[in-house]
Each structure stands twice: as C-alpha cells, then as structure tokens.
Image: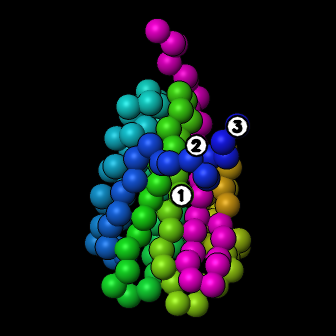
Amino acid sequence: MVDRQERRADVELRLPADGAYASVLRTTTAGLAARLDFTLDDIEDLRMAAGEAGAMVLERAEPGGDLVCAYHLAPGRLTMTLTVTADQPADPDYESFAWQVLSTLAADASAEATPDAFTVSLTMESDLVAPGP
C-alpha cells in the first residue's frame, strides 16, 4: 500500500504566503469538502480548521515564499497538508489556540519543522458518508 504522503495529491493549491490569500484556502477547502458530500456542519468545521492551519504555517513563512496545500480526497475523508518555506522554522506550539482548534476538529493533526520548511497536516472525516453508486 502506498503511504498517503508518498502518492501524488489529488488537488494541489499554491498561493503566496500572505494572509490576504487565506480566504482562497478556506474557500477551496470548503468546495472540495462539498464535493465529497460533507455535511454543512462538517464543511464549516473544515473551513475553520483550514484557517487555523493556514495561520500556523503563515506565521513561520519566509517573506515572498509560497504556501502549498496538497489535498488527498476519499469518500467522507479529506486530508490536507500545508507547507511553507521557512528560514528558521520553530517547533510547533502545541499550546496555541490554533493547535487546540485543529486537534479538536480534526480526526488527525500533525505539525513538523524541518531545516527549511514548516508543515501542518490534518485529516477531517465527514459525519455522513454518502452511499456508493
């Protein structure tokens, strides 16, 4: 079985690492969740989680860099991985409000600092999975 991180993303969004584009991230995420038949409540939770994850990575982003969000889609499940290039990425602040929101809303959440990047990943699962064909 191919690890989710090793396979190509179903959708990839690349934006300037600037808070002015946070609404594009939230709207794209909500649109993908709607395509997966997430409930309205689940979509709003995912929109909020995407905003908090975006805020976490943007505060560590290198000026002029990009925010890359890779989406992996499955029935009733959306995994997103947000990455920015960072000069000196710090370890994640697991006590922050943003992290508390992510860990409460997401089925799974993780963060990683490497020498040149900062990444936040989260998986959301729908309360209602649409029946198959």
Given residues 88 and 24, the one toward you in this image is: 88
Label 1, label 3: how far apart the Cα atoms are: 20 Å
Q: Amino acid at mark 3?
A: Met
Name the side, left or right, on which 54 lies relative to 26.
Answer: right
The residue under label 3 is 1
Q: Please give the name of the residue rendered at 52% of the width and 13% of the height, measured from the top-left corner.
A: 131
The residue under label 2 is 124
The residue under label 1 is 81
Q: Please give the name of the residue rendered at 58% of the width and 64% of the height, measured from the top-left corner.
A: 120
Please say whether residue 78 is one of the residues in the magenta stretch.
no
Label 1, label 2: how far apart the Cα atoms are: 12 Å
Q: Amino acid at mark 1?
A: Thr
Up/down of 68 relative to 78, above or below: below
Q: x%, y% of residue 1?
A: 70, 37
Query: Which stretch did the figure color magenta?
Result: 111-133
- Res 97 quadrant in image: bottom right
